[in-house]
């Protein structure tokens, strides 16, 4: 039985951690650069591309849209379509890949045509209304085919236009802003007019929007940000391939091994991401260092080992929502309760992560409390062995595997859900786990 098909995976207690892990490519960078490469003029060679379900959905969608894509392992050659997809009709199934659904919705709506976008049932429960409202403001024809405010979607018409002031909310998901930003350079009139995007509410997960801006710049489109709520896109002829682009290792995935090094003794080193990463989740290492972990960083690595006892206390997670899930596990090993705040975006991810984390932490014996946008976890003196439900959420599986360091082991149900972003996760964990 392969891991993809296994109902559960039994993890024995991990006595200590030590070793090195080469990270897979960043999901956020991989799917953004695939789309930008497809929209650009010229051919782009992507090195280190993530090989997982989310990128597979994006790649299949691009092929259905008529883009020529050649992939060998983690190298992908994308022959850009120059701003407009060759196929004006397509029925796209994108699983639960938010980094594919949101940007493709925007790009296709700006182009116009005859498209449908659908995914797994959970994707149809994840809100998209703020993005649709913003796109309709620019003349896009988008219709809900089931429940208003949620996928699946139908896209038609002649496409949207650039120009003017585009209001959009930022307090549900930064992916909505990123999607609009990436789509505007291929909208009607983009070469002749300036567009100003104005946030009407504070932006969550701002570092992910910064990734988008930096990648757009690599593809020849610069966005001015005169203040925190304004994004000004000058008239532009569109995207141009940078030639070869190397995808960083996934900083969110790094969080599990950095945490393992701190709570399991270490040293554990991750390679592929370092101090100059463009990913906001690299700040997870700084958070653990402030908590007491011994963290060392280089240009292309982060190394972690046990330092002082972890402090606990209140941690503002607004900039690291994905990596913050790992802090809910390290909280069990702290000397005082840990309160994670500004995590409201967890509720609209692959599952309601606040509710899911609370339910599964309780199985381990943890004492906790939760609110609409916070979670507090007390230190756990004695771990109970538990069967952890993962809710088809890769991050639930990866986080709770670290509970095996608590001394009782853990059983992960549906371990194959990690294929979404890190198919080799459990093999990587096994390489740094030691029982003596």
Image (spheres, helix red, strand yellow):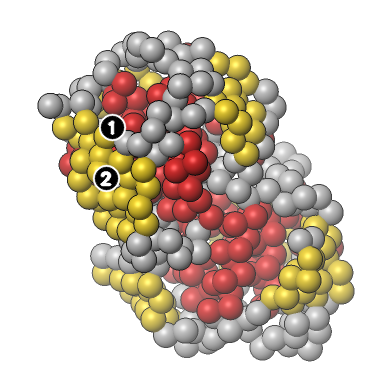
Location of the N terminus (image quadrant):
top left
Residue drawn at x 54%, y 21% as measured from the top left: 337
Point out residue 5 in the picture as x, y percentages from the top left corner: 27, 34
Comparing 39 with 346, the one in front is: 346
Residue drawn at x 39%, y 60% as measured from the top left: 274
Q: Spatial distance from mark 2 to mark 1, Cα to Cα?
A: 9 Å
Point out residue 313 in the picture as x, y percentages from the top left corner: 57, 28
Report whether residue 10 is seen: no
**Horizontal arrangement in the rendering, residue 136 relative to residue 85 (left or right):** right
Report whether residue 230 is seen: yes
Q: Residue furthest front?
A: 308
Asked which quadrant contains residue 56, the reply is bottom left
Q: Which dot marks residue 222?
A: none
Vertical position of residue 395 compared to residue 281: above or below: above
Determine the secondary structure under disc 2.
strand
Q: Which dot marks residue 264?
A: 1
User: Crowdedness of circle 1 by 10 Å Cα count: few (<14), some, many (20+)?
Assistant: many
Location of the C terminus (image quadrant):
top left
**Horizontal arrangement in the rendering, residue 227 relative to residue 16 (left or right):** right
Q: Residue furthest right?
A: 164
Vertical position of residue 282 compared to residue 66: above or below: above
The answer to the question of whether label 2 and label 1 lie on touching residues, with beta carbons closer than 8 A, is yes
Q: Which residue is mark 2?
A: 268
Comparing 38 with 196, the one in front is: 196
Vertical position of residue 401 compared to residue 88: above or below: above
Residue drawn at x 64%, y 33% as measured from the top left: 341
Point out residue 394 in the picture as x, y percentages from the top left corner: 41, 38
Determine the secondary structure under disc 1.
helix
Point out residue 95 in the picture as x, y percentages from the top left corner: 48, 47
Vertical position of residue 117 compared to residue 364: above or below: below
Residue drawn at x 64%, y 28% as measured from the top left: 374
């Amino acid at each position: 039985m392969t891991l993809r098909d296994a109902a559960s995976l039994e993890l024995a207690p991990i006595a200590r951690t030590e070793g090195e892990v080469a990270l897979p490519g960043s999901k956020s960078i991989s799917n953004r650069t695939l789309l930008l490469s497809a929209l650009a003029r010229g051919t782009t060679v992507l090195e280190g591309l993530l090989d997982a379900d989310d990128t597979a959905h994006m790649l299949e969608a691009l092929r259905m849209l008529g883009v020529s894509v050649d992939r060998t392992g983690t190298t992908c050659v994308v022959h850009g379509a120059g701003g407009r997809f060759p196929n004006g009709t397509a029925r796209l199934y994108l699983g639960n890949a938010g980094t594919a659904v949101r940007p493709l919705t925007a790009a296709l709506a700006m182009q116009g045509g005859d498209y449908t976008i659908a995914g797994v049932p959970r994707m149809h429960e994840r809100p998209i209304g703020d993005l649709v409202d913003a796109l309709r403001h620019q003349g896009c024809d988008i219709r809900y085919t089931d429940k208003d405010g949620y996928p699946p979607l139908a896209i038609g018409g002649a496409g949207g236009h650039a120009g003017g002031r585009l209001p959009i909310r930022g307090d549900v998901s930064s992916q909505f802003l990123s999607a609009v930003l990436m789509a505007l350079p291929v909208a009607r009139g983009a070469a002749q007019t300036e567009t100003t995007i104005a946030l009407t509410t504070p932006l969550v997960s701002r570092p992910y929007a910064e990734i988008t801006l930096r990648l757009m710049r690599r593809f020849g489109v610069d966005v001015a940000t005169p203040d925190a709520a304004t994004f000004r896109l000058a008239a532009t002829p569109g995207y141009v391939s940078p030639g070869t682009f190397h995808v960083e290792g996934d900083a969110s995935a790094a969080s599990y091994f950095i945490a393992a090094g701190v709570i399991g003794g270490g040293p554990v080193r991750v390679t592929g991401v370092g101090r100059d990463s463009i990913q906001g989740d690299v700040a997870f290492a700084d958070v653990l260092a402030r908590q007491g972990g011994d963290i060392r960083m280089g240009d292309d690595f982060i190394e972690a080992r046990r330092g002082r006892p972890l402090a606990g206390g209140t941690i503002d997670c607004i900039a690291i929502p994905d990596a913050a899930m790992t802090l809910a596990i390290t909280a069990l090993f702290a000397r005082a309760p840990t309160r994670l705040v500004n995590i409201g975006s967890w509720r609209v991810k692959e599952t309601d992560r606040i509710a899911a984390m609370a339910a599964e932490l309780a199985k381990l014996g943890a004492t906790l409390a939760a609110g609409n946008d916070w979670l507090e976890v007390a230190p756990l003196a004695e771990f109970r062995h538990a069967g952890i439900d993962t809710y088809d959420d890769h991050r639930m599986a990866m986080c709770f595997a670290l509970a095996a360091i608590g001394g009782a082991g853990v059983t992960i149900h549906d371990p194959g859900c990690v294929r979404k972003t890190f198919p080799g996760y459990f093999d990587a964990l096994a390489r740094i786990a030691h029982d003596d």
